[in-house]
Amino acid sequence: MSVAYEARTSPPADGTPGRSVVHVVDELDLDHAGALDAALRAVLADAGGPTEIVIDLRNCSFCDSSGLNALIRAREAALRAGHTLSLAAPSHQMLRLLCLTDSAALFPVCSA
């Protein structure tokens, strides 16, 4: 099954580069990590795109190592492009995965 992740860019009223929110739905696993990669590549490819990228996890029911690797790749790509990347509403399971893999410090948590 393929999930098309939704990415919305919300420019601030002052005209400065804005924030793009990628909404993750369902599971973030081997079957779905490619969809997240594609959504984030599209956000990063947007000329003059946002300086802040938020991955909204409120509707993500599960994340495995494939999903975690997709998040880490996204963080690295965002940093290379001069953007920040943060997670919004990570579940207890997601936070536990980040802690167990010593990657929690890589992802600031914010509100979406």
Image: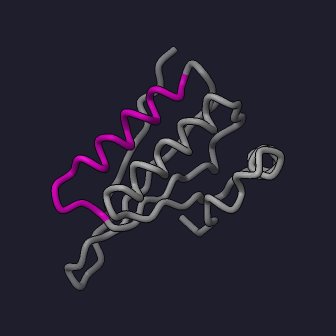
The reply to whether the magenta stretch includes residue 46 is yes
Tell me: residue 91, above or below residue 17. Answer: above
Instruction: Please tell me which residue is depicted at 37% across the width and 63% down the height of the picture.
Output: 83
Left or right, 76 with respect to 20, comes to right
Tell me which segment is drawn in magenta: 32-50
Instruction: Please tell me which residue is depicted at 37% across the width and 59% down the height of the picture.
Output: 20
Residue 97 at x, y percent in the picture: 78, 44
Residue 108 at x, y percent in the picture: 61, 66
Left or right, 11 with respect to 112, comes to left
The reply to whether the magenta stretch includes residue 40 is yes
Residue 18's image quarter?
bottom left
Left or right, 93 with respect to 12, comes to right
Residue 36 at x, y percent in the picture: 46, 35
Instruction: Please tell me which residue is depicted at 80% across the width and 52% down the height of the picture.
Output: 99
**Magenta stretch mostly in which secondary structure?**
helix
Q: Extreme top residue here?
A: 1
